[in-house]
Image (tube, helix red, strand yellow):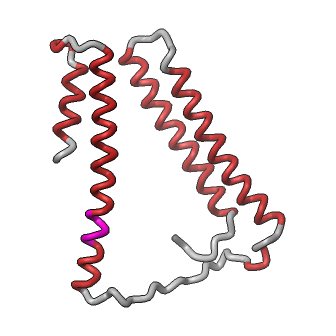
Amino acid sequence: QFLAIPAFLVVLTQWKGFHFTESIQNNFHLAFGIVILLWATWFLFYFEKIVHGERQRWGMEDLKNVEITLASYNPDLRGSWTFTFTQILGKFLTILFLSIFIVATFLLSFAPLPSTVLNMIQTILIFVFAFVWSKIAKRLVLRENHRTQA
């Protein structure tokens, strides 16, 4: 509920009735991003506190995690060139995909289109990149020979 207030203010800056300049709108977007960052940080720390409290309340603070080795795990691959190549390929593809997304977003910001069209294209771009990355990431993770399931 707390995030609804700054989000509402950002939406108000976009409304034509208030006649905010683009600079003011950008400042509201920046402020909203900072609020989200601070809220997410607070939420993670607060959630950890709740988890520890519940773990103590349920008497599970000394509970050991049971790790089940995956059937697909092959210990012979550890240290091999295939394993090393897969690790490097995963990192490279992640950086490459992220770089392509950043460049596409940056170039899109210079397109001579109305802001509503740019926003819709940006949204579509995010969904397309998320879909494609979900397929790539799943294949990469399956090739990485993990010992246990996360």
| 65 relative to 17 in the view: left or right | right
Can you give x and y, in whole percent of width and height, for residue 28 in the image? Answer: 27, 27
The residue shown at (61%, 36%) is 99
Residue, x 83% and y 64% (percent of image)?
A: 81
Q: Nearer the viewer, residue 145 or 59?
A: 59
* Rendering coords of residue 9 (x, y %): 19, 29
Task: Name the residue: 16% across, 14% down.
Answer: 18
Does the segment drawn in magenta span residue 15? no
The residue positioned 74% from the left and 59% from the top of the image is 86
Q: Position of residue 67 (x, y in %)?
A: 53, 83
In the image, residue 60 above or below residue 106: below
Q: Nearer the viewer, residue 128 or 93?
A: 93
The answer to whether 80 appears left or right of 65 in the picture is right
Look at the magenta stretch and give its main secondary structure.
helix
The residue segment tinted magenta is 46-50
Splitting the image into 4 quarters, where does residue 31 fall?
A: top left
Q: Could you say where residue 116 lies in the image, as x and y percent from the top left?
A: 36, 18
